[in-house]
Amino acid sequence: MNARTPRSCKRCGKCCMADFVAYVTDEDIKRWQQEEREDILRIIDHEHAFWAGDHLLSSEGGRYLRGCPLLVWEGDHCACSIYDTRPQVCVDFIPGSSELCPQFENLK
């Protein structure tokens, strides 16, 4: 496959291992406020994830985070529990475009 060949998402969840809150935009927050999505806004206000070596921890109690708190597992693949209103960074993500994705190909 080359860089121009579209890839289908394998729903592995690897791209969801980043700190969800770090990529949320003001526009995302405004949309969730208008949608009255207190569940999402509460996570943003309280999660405060930080990198601790090779994994994320919550600064609110030190709990181990396995990536986006809105990621859910369905058998052997994952799904976004807020897919219809997910952050713009997730809408724009192209499978294979990041080193986080197992379909990534270093074209250098």
Image: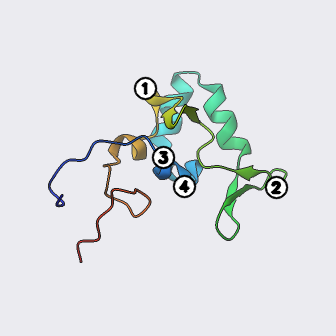
Labelled pair 3, 4 in contact (Cβ < 8 Å): no
**Depth order, front residue of 78/97:** 78
N-term mark: 4 or 2 = 4
Q: Which residue is mark 2?
A: 62
Given this view, does label 3 or label 2 mark the residue nearer the observer? Answer: 2
Read off the residue under disc 3. Answer: 25
Which kind of residue does numbered mark 4 sit on? Ala
Give percent across and percent down for residue 65: 69, 50
Q: Amino acid at mark 1?
A: Asp
Residue 39 located left or right of residue 81:
right
Q: Quadrant of the N terminus?
A: bottom left
Residue at horizontal 41%, vertical 43%?
A: 90
Number of residues whose C-alpha sits closer than 10 Å to that of mark 1, classed few (under 14), some (14–19) or many (20 or more): few
- Image quadrant assignment for residue 36: top right
Q: Earlier in the sequence, mark 1 or mark 2?
A: 2
Q: Earlier in the sequence, mark 3 or mark 1?
A: 3
The answer to which image quadrant residue 106 occupies is bottom left
What residue did someone put label 4 on?
Answer: 18
Q: Secondary structure at mark 4?
A: loop
The residue that appears at 69% across and 34% down in the rendered structure is 42
